[in-house]
Amino acid sequence: MKKQPIGVFDSGLGGLTILKALRRQLPHEDLIYFGDTANVPYGSKSKAAVTKFSLAIARFLQSQEVKLIIVACNTASAQALAELRREMDVPVMGVIEPGAQKAAKVTRNGRIAVLGTEGTVRSKAYPKAILKRAPRAAVLQQACPLFVPLAEESWGQKPAARLIAREYLEPVQKSGADTVILGCTHYPLLKPVIASILGKKVTLVDSADTLAEAAQQFLASRRQLETGGKGRVRLYASDDPARFKHLAQRLLAEPIGAVRLKKLDL
């Protein structure tokens, strides 16, 4: 089991922020990443559609004999995690619990804001997870549907990104939240503009590192940690692998091999 890879999936590029954290935290592990570029974004889709896509990807990863599946997508974690855990024969870890735990721990005034896709906000998964850990917390949710295409197009430094971010973040500023969860794996790609608008007194919670730590602890508890050699990465995309490779190489800041095209069996 130690030598089996870890499977990671997201609706597109965003989950590469988690892949990068896993590479730092678990340098000896082989990783398989699946970006569902044919169906991005998930945030505006129905729960049924998100669950269908997630199950198809998880089945593919399971066929690659992974020892753990990490759902590096907040929308899929919010809407499909329970179904994935019922259907899969390997453990499945989501991204919401680690982020909620960290936010509850670091907030100073008990006011926490969640930036997420429409699907994640509708699910109320973050407020439920936060209030389980901090029952007196005040939680504001803010849907930011345009953040995903901005991140996918690498427009984080464009004036349009700042204009849109100001609009989305105004209710967050008015709420007095001192802790803001980046509740979509694409949003860390816009972290500089979000941080500059909210200011230094607001803590941004990017669950990538927290999730990587949780994965390490989980595998260690099962004595499945790989401790020798340098881990390899295999990348799959459900559409346009050439474009995905170009953007992934820039984001990961390291040479990557071929990105394989894998259509989903729906």
Image (spheres, rainbow, N blue to C red):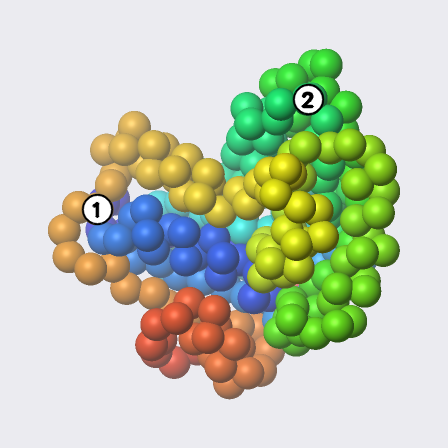
Marker disc for residue 109: 2
Residue 171, image x, y percentages: 85, 42
Which image quadrant for residue 212? top left
Q: Nearer the viewer, residue 249 or 164?
A: 164
Quadrant into which the C terminus falls: bottom right
Total marks placed: 2
Marks 2 and 1, the one that precedes in the sequence: 2
Q: Is residue 166 left or right of residue 183?
A: right
Up the image or down, 137 lies above or below 3; here it is above
Given the image, on which type of amino acid does mark 1 rest? Glu
The residue that appears at 53% across and 42% down in the rendered structure is 207
Q: Are marks 2 and 1 in contact (CB under 8 Å)?
A: no
Given the image, on which type of amino acid does mark 2 rest? Asn
Residue at the disc numbered 1: 226
Quadrant into which the N terminus falls: top left
Q: Is residue 240 left or right of residue 213?
A: right
The residue that appears at 41% across and 35% down in the rendered structure is 214
Q: Is residue 241 visible?
A: no
Up the image or down, 86 lies above or below 65; here it is above
Say which element carries label 1. Answer: loop
Q: Nearer the viewer, residue 200 or 185?
A: 200
Residue 54, image x, y percentages: 61, 54
Residue 115, image x, y percentages: 72, 46
Up the image or down, 93 lies above or below 51; here it is above
Marker disc for residue 7: none
The residue that appears at 61% across and 43% down in the rendered structure is 200
Residue 61, image x, y percentages: 45, 57
